[in-house]
Image (tube, grey):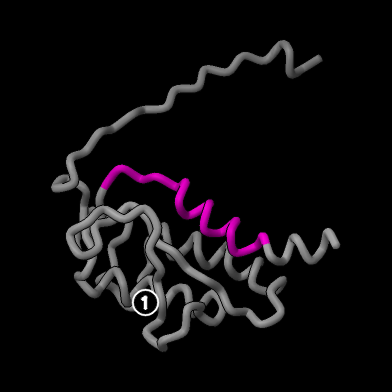
Amino acid sequence: DHASSSKFNFKLPSILLAPTEIPQPRDPDSLHYCMTEPINNPYTRAITSVGSVLESYDSDRRIAVWGFGAKVGGQVQHCFQITDGSGQSEVLGTQGILQAYANLMRSGTITLSGPTLLQQVITTAVSMIEPFKAGLDA
C-alpha cells in the first residue's frame, strides 16, 4: 500500500500580526492590493476562478457576498454584507462580486483586521439555505 509507506512532514507556520501590521488594500504589499485597474490580486483571481464555475449553477446568478475579518465603523466584524451599491442584497454574477469587492477595498471604510473567524459567515450561509433544504425534504 503506497499510502501507508509514504511519510509526510506538514508544518503550518503561525504568524501573529497586530491589526496595525496587516497590510491594507492600498498597500502594494497587501494580498488585497486594489489600486490597479482592473484589480489583479490573489483574491480577485480566486473569485474569478471559483465564481465563473459556480455561477452557472445559479438560475438567476444573484449572489450574496459577505466579508469577514475587518473593522467596519471601528468594530471588528466577522460577517458583514458586501454590496455593489445598487441597494440590492445580492450582486449579479462573478463580475458583480468583483465590482462589490473593488468598491469596498477602495472605499477606505474598512480596515483589515484579525482574527479571521469564519463561523459567522458559515452560520449565515447555512441559515439562508435552510428554507430550501426544508422544501427538498418535504
Q: In this view, does 93 lie to the left or right of 103?
A: right
Picture coordinates of residue 136 (x, y %)?
A: 82, 63
Q: Is mark 1 on a helix, strand or loop?
A: loop
Callout 1: few (<14), some (14-19), or many (20+) C-alpha neighbours within 10 Å? few
**In the shown orientation, is residue 75 left or right of residue 97?**
left
The magenta segment is 114-130
Question: Between 80 and 30, which is closer to the camera in this rendering?
Answer: 80
Residue 88 shows up from this direction: yes
Amino acid type at circle 1 is: Pro
* Residue sticking out furthest to the left: 20
Q: Does the magenta stretch include residue 74?
A: no
| Rendered image quadrant of residue 112 | bottom left
In this rendering, is residue 136 above or below 107? Answer: above
Residue located at (28% from left, 62% from top): 33
Q: Check disc 1 and report the residue beneath it.
A: 38
42 with respect to 76 (left or right): right
